[in-house]
Amino acid sequence: MKRGIHFLLILFCFQGIISAQDISFPELSGFRKQTSYPVYMPDNLWDFINGAADNYLAYGFADLHVAEYKKGKNTIKLEIYRHQDNTMAFGIYSSERSSGFEFLKLGSQGYRTGGSINFFKGNYYVKIRTFSKKENILKAVENLAIRVAESLPGEAALPQALLMFPENGLKKNEEVFINESVLGHDFLNKAFRAGYEVGPDSFSIYLFRGDATDIMKAAMTYVTTTGMEADEGAEGKYVLTDGYNGTVFLGWKDGALVLITGLAADQADIADSYISGILK
């Protein structure tokens, strides 16, 4: 029996090593590839990105593979972060993205800023950068990004939940995924957030999706924490006064919960039109 358990432990560890080593770094013409970095795991990610590690761990970080490409005094660094799933990869990617960047059709979505190109695809978040400003080196960064995107497994698509956000007033490329403590509440987790601007009004919409029972429980917990009485049911709408977030419009139906912040209490008609559009 002990021998069997010992064998299973060895097999489990061996499979873990395999899963952490199955990244293949492409060649880059004219550059010398170096892959001497260790594979970083959740317990030693701090060794590579120090204070930023907590944010990556909050988005289901699994492992990180690093390579460098050298040509004379020029260096290109490639970092491939693997996360729990596509939503988590989008979450970490979106937390470091700005709508003012130059966006690229790369993987699921990518952008260029200075000598850096970042993108995500499937479960992967990829960061490539150089400090060189030479045109041929910057072009090599782009070529490397294309080759990595082609080699990584997974669908090149944005999370399906983003399609539920109405187009009217949507601020493009500002959508994010928040994995924990949405609006500062520990009972609100795993939400997509989109920013809106309609006329003089700017507001945010948070979308949660999941098991219908869990969604209803989260909604009722939020309602009761603001001092209101919650009615159990398949759907409901409330206007809440949150001590930390001001007026919050809430609506849920089946497996979806919507929160809207940034609107005044007398703008319920605007909030209701968006909530109804999402929960239709």
Image (cartoon, helix red, strand yellow):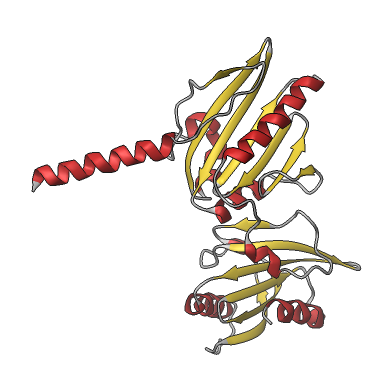
Q: Residue at x 78, y 31 (%)?
A: 114
* Spot occupied by residue 171 in the image (x, y as percentages of width and height): 80, 59
The answer to whether any part of residue 126 appears in the image is no
120 sits to left or right of 233: right
Q: Position of residue 79 (x, y in %)?
A: 58, 32
Point 54% across, 58% down: residue: 180
Corner quadrant of residue 127: top right
Q: Residue at x 72, y 22 (%)?
A: 131
Extreme-top residue of the structure: 72
* Residue in the picture at 91% in, 68% down: 199
Residue 63 higher or lower than 211, as above or below:
above
Confirm whether residue 39 shows in the render.
yes
The one of 91 and 236 positioned closer to us in this rendering: 91
Residue 141 point in image, percent of width and height: 71, 28
Position of the C terminus by quadrant: bottom right
Q: Nearer the viewer, residue 163 or 194?
A: 163
The residue closer to the viewer here, 114 or 267, is 114
